[in-house]
Amino acid sequence: MGYRWVVSLGAWATSLIILWLISVPLIAQTAFRTPWGDPDLQGTWTNTTTTPMERPSELAGREVLTDEERAEFDADAIRNADRPPPPGSTGAYNNFWFERGVRTDQTSWIVDPPSGTLPLITPKEEQRIVDLALVRDSSSYPTTWEDVNIYERCITRGMPGTMMPGFYNHNYLILQIPGYVVLRAEMIHDTRIIPVDGRTHIDSSIRQWLGDSRGHWEGDTLVVETTNLTDKVFERRFSNTVYGTGRHMHLVERFTRLDAETIDYRFTVTDPTTFRRPWTAATPMAALDGPIFEYACHEGNYAMVNMLSGARAKEEATE
């Protein structure tokens, strides 16, 4: 009797082990899936980093840093965080207000071109930059509120600026329901509602601040194509947003969940009226332990009134 019990226990244990071995791959396959079967990107994420957008000249030809180099760059960032502003400048926020993050092992966000730098711009874009500099250097700047770029006016950072790190509030909430992915940025609370149900883009005559985004799944990767952007990111006085290029830009983003803590995020900008070739940037998104917060850009903000008042006073003083 005792022998049969031991045999039965051994058979039961063997069956349990076999069942566990069979189930492990199934668990791995469904670990980051929504109840309806799509890859699960949901949660709060941040892509805050001190990695520069373009590769510094001293790192030319190198794509990655060593652990020792990363640690030294982070130490330098801390040491230089609260340097006093240059003479004549009021300065900006000190390090207490910034969320700088840490260095990744990349030497730049830009991964293509292989140089890690932005491609050459077109003659049209070169002229636009010259015109913009003339406006900004004018003694009457800003002449009107329209001279000030849309980011300073708390309208939007445009695309791909909304998804790019650099100073603070680079945090994102991703939600999913069948047929849609919703992405809310903390900075200026821009919200993108992205259909993933196969529908086509809206009519090309309709232009939007963040463009018209359509998504689809390529394996475990969400691919988002954005068109229908607007030239209003430049305004009438050539004011700019964060690397937005206007109505001719075609943007392709790729979101891939790597593990519980990481999304690989990368995007490709194609705009032959601005850049002489497409370029691609990549920056990881890390899980954020906590919610994103309300971004109240204009509450108690007298910057626009003060800038215009100062410009008018300067004009009167020079007449």
Image: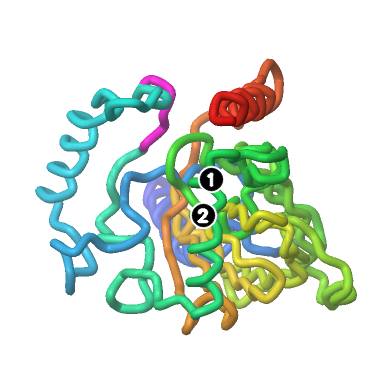
The residue beneath circle 1 is: 138
Q: Quadrant of residue 40?
A: bottom right
Residue at the top extreme, as displayed: 300
Q: For the magenta stretch, what is the residue range?
A: 96-100
Q: Are marks 1 and 2 in contact (CB under 8 Å)?
A: yes
Horizontally, residue 153 falls left or right of residue 241, namely right
| Crowd rating for badge 2 (residues with CA inside 10 Å; few <14, some 14–19, many 20+) | few
The residue tagged with tag 1: helix, strand or loop?
loop
Q: Residue at x 30, y 41 (%)?
A: 102
Picture coordinates of residue 177, whole percent (x, y) = 79, 53
Picture coordinates of residue 198, whole percent (x, y) = 81, 76
Figure coloring: rainbow
The residue beneath circle 2 is: 134
Q: In this picture, is 81 found above or below 66?
A: above
The residue tagged with tag 2: helix, strand or loop?
helix
Residue at the left extreme, as displayed: 68
Q: Main secondary structure of the magenta part?
A: loop
Q: Quadrant of residue 146?
A: top right
Horizontally, residue 265 falls left or right of residue 273, namely left
Asked whether residue 38 is drawn in magenta, I would say no
Q: Which image quarter holds the C terminus?
A: top right
Picture coordinates of residue 188, whole percent (x, y) = 66, 38
Q: Amino acid at mark 1?
A: Ser
Q: Amino acid at mark 2?
A: Leu
Q: In this picture, is 12 found above or below 307?
A: below
Horizontally, residue 249 falls left or right of residue 163, namely right
Examine the rendering and report whether any part of residue 188 can be seen.
Answer: no
Examine the rendering and report whether any part of residue 216 can be seen.
Answer: yes
